[in-house]
Amino acid sequence: MCRYPVKSMLGEPLPHAEVTGRGLAGDRRLALLDLATGKVASAKYPARWRELLQLTAVLGSAGVEITGPSGLRLHADDPSKAGEVLSGLLGRPVALIAEPPAEGELDRAVPEEVLAAGPAAEVGFTVSRFGSGAPAGTFFDFAPVHLVTTATLERTGAAWQRYRPNLVIRTDGPPGYPENAWLGRELAIGPELRLKVVALSPRCAVPTLAHGELRPDPQVLRVVARENRVEPLAGLGPLPCAGAYAKVLQPGRIAPGDPVALG
């Protein structure tokens, strides 16, 4: 169980979490705005933003703290200073923001082109509106809860951190992609939380990138592209998918080890 207080940065494992219609408390609370384009910075475009995955954001009693290489330590309660330091680190002017811009757009590199040319290459990209399945004013890519199963992780050989889920759900049975059969179904987690799976998760280039001490690994995307091209949502056509997105039907408090029941 994990949250990511700043979009596209590394997150923090949690001993418990309150989950509401806006996802896990504190998840994707902040993001960086690219002042040159007016778009939200996302590691989905690795040539510009892959270094975000070398930064870690945690949420404590004093707010969001960002740490990184060479002893970097920033506090989000001083967004002007944070923006200045992060602009220098990333090589582009950015601002730390708590509210999405009106357009709410980000660039998503074509994953196959990243695999072919490498993460530093300027490749083709699409422009996405984020949060179409989430409450207004949030920074989620689609819906407020992102989950992946241990069966999918075992099949792809990926560390769970590469897929940036909120929830890792242990499943019995052989390695595979059980989330494919969960679309439209409900999940009961613990005594209170109820979710509905609303889309499968199409994979971008992010899982292939270095995540802190995890080295780059293009294979985790190649496996999914070869084995699990399915339609994540009606009308999108087949895409490489691993994991799923869910919306919250009933809020609740959860903790690692809570039972999960598929309705």
Image (cartoon, rainbow, N blue to C red):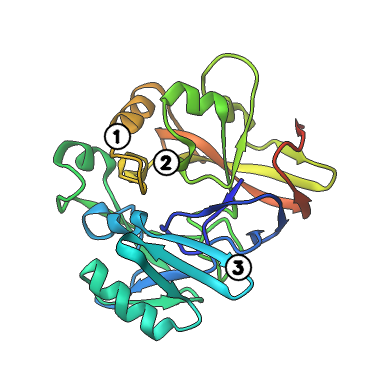
In the rendered image, is residue 208 in sight? yes
Mark 3 and mark 1: span between their CA atoms? 31 Å
Q: Position of residue 207 (x, y in %)?
A: 37, 41
Depth check, front residue: 126 or 261: 261
State the quadrant of the C terminus.
top right
Q: Residue at x 31, y 76 (%)?
A: 85
CA separation in Å, label 2 and label 1: 9 Å
Amino acid identity at mark 3: Gly
Amino acid type, residue under disc 1 in the picture = Asp
Is the N terminus in the top left, top right, bottom left or bottom right quadrant? top right
Q: Secondary structure at mark 2?
A: helix
Secondary structure at numbered mark 1 = loop
Q: Residue furthest top?
A: 174
Q: Is residue 69 left or right of residue 177?
A: left
**In this orientation, which residue lies closer to the viewer: 176 or 106?**
176
Q: Which mark is residue 162?
A: 2
Q: Is residue 101 visible?
A: no
Amino acid identity at mark 2 = Arg
**Place of residue 199 in the rendered image (x, y in percent of width and height, measured from the top left):** 55, 42
Q: Are marks 2 and 1 in contact (CB under 8 Å)?
A: yes
Position in image of residue 88 (x %, y %) = 24, 74
Residue beneath the point at 49% across and 23% down: 154
Using a 10 Å C-alpha cutoff, classify the residue at mark 2 as few (fewer than 14 neighbours), some (14 to 19) or many (20 or more). Answer: many
Q: Residue at x 45, y 84 (%)?
A: 78
| Residue 32 vertical position relative to residue 49 in the rendered view, above or below | below
Q: Looking at the image, which residue is at 20% across and 70% down?
A: 91
Q: Which residue is mark 3?
A: 60
Disc 1 marks which residue? 217
